[in-house]
Amino acid sequence: MSVVRGAAPVAPARLMFSQIALFGLAVFALLVFSGGWELPAVGENATEAGSAILRVGYLPAYAAGFALIALRPGATLRVVIRQPFLVALMVVAVASMFWSVNPDQTVRRCFALVCTTLGGVALAARFRWPQLAEVVGAAFAVLIVACFVVCLAVPRIGVMTELFPGAWRGLWREKNGLGGLMAFGFCILSAAALLNPRRARLWWTFAGLAVVLVLMSTSKTSLVSLVLGAGAVGFVLVARRGPAVGTAATWAGVTGVVLLIAFSLFAADVFFAILGKDATLTGRTKIWSAVMREIEDRPWQGYGYSAVWGDKSGWGPFAWISKNAGFQAQHAHNSWLEQWLGLGLVGLIAWGLFYLQTMTLAVIAVFRDRGALLAFPFLVVYSLVSLTESIAVVYNDFRWVLFVAFAAKLAFPDREIQA
């Protein structure tokens, strides 16, 4: 009898340890994907091609993702089946190695892309919405603490001294990296607070610290993203209060978006002045024009996944883009043009359908599923940022992992996840 009494607590203890271990494994993978370790580890001038640390530094995150998949292979398969456009997008990316202008590079980066994408799928298959919010929130909390430490204690790393003296950059190479990520962080941490009331005070505290970091980065674009994300959180809260209120909130939101678009089109000078940008969006329109010229030469198949920007031959599409833009860019600064340039029209359509499916499910979730508190604000900010940055279908990227996770989770309800 004593043996039975002594053995009873073992199962709950093991279960708790297992849950903590899985939580920690997921947080670890997200921290690696955040890239916050790159600047302290290799400095600001290192490139992936020139640093062995960067080439292997993401392997532990891949391993963590595969471990999560191995624990729930059936659930992961069901998630993948419900994302046909994501599967098509990965197929096009991998197939592009056969017509890539830089096939060796495309092969390596496609491997990284698939592993990164599977990391997001694994998160969706393993965690319910409240848990997922806290997993991502915990990763942001660690990054926030680390940013304050490095900015205050080691300013030579955390504070910019040349291009934007005094602006905080935290663990990333420039201020927009910090500000942009913390705008996303505010949305995530707010959702963690709303979905987990018992720990709401903790998550609201970190959400406030994320706002401080956005302000200290002095990035006006990130500040706009922050305001937009906060508005999206408020919209979800209001829309879920009832059909009448939800309808009114929807009309108000649509009207606000239309007015913002009209303001940006018909009062462009004022709009750009508020953002602290010139009419070329800091040279982005020049890059877009140069990219479109190259797309015209290979509109259907593109140049291969991630093949253009690493081509230093001096005669390929990168050289022509640099010549026409007047400077060397690192990417197309537009997620849609990036897909067209690398994956051709077929890849662009696959990305567009995947994005459309995700946004449709997110809008439906606003009125039906509390998971919208986590997914919808993030996706709204993501949509804005994707117009001026290449953040879609990106290997080793925190934001792409989260986009895939939320997209997959919207199609995989909590009731299908076993405890």
Image (spheres, helix red, strand yellow):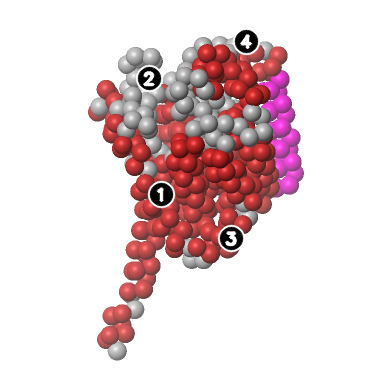
Q: How far, Cα to Cα, is label 1 from label 3? A: 20 Å
Of badges 4 and 1, the one in the foreground is 1
Above or below residue 364? Residue 390 is: above
Q: Report the residue marked by disc 1.
A: 62
Give, as a single range, the part of the protein colored magenta: 241-262
Q: Report the residue marked by disc 2.
A: 167
The picture quadrant where one finds residue 294 is: top right
- Of the two numbered discs 4 and 3 on the same chain, state the one appearing first in sequence: 3
- Of the two numbered discs 1 and 2 on the same chain, state the one appearing first in sequence: 1
SS of the residue under disc 2: loop
- Check if mark 1's residue and mark 2's residue have beta carbons within 8 Å: no
Q: Is residue 413 left or right of residue 200?
A: right
Q: Residue at x 45, y 33 (%)?
A: 182
Q: Report the residue marked by disc 3.
A: 78
- Which amino acid lies under the numbered mark 3 shown in the image of this protein? Arg
SS of the residue under disc 1: helix
Q: How far, Cα to Cα, is label 4 from label 3? A: 49 Å
Q: How far, Cα to Cα, is label 1 from label 2? A: 33 Å
Disc 4 packing (10 Å; few <14; some 14–19; many ≥20): some
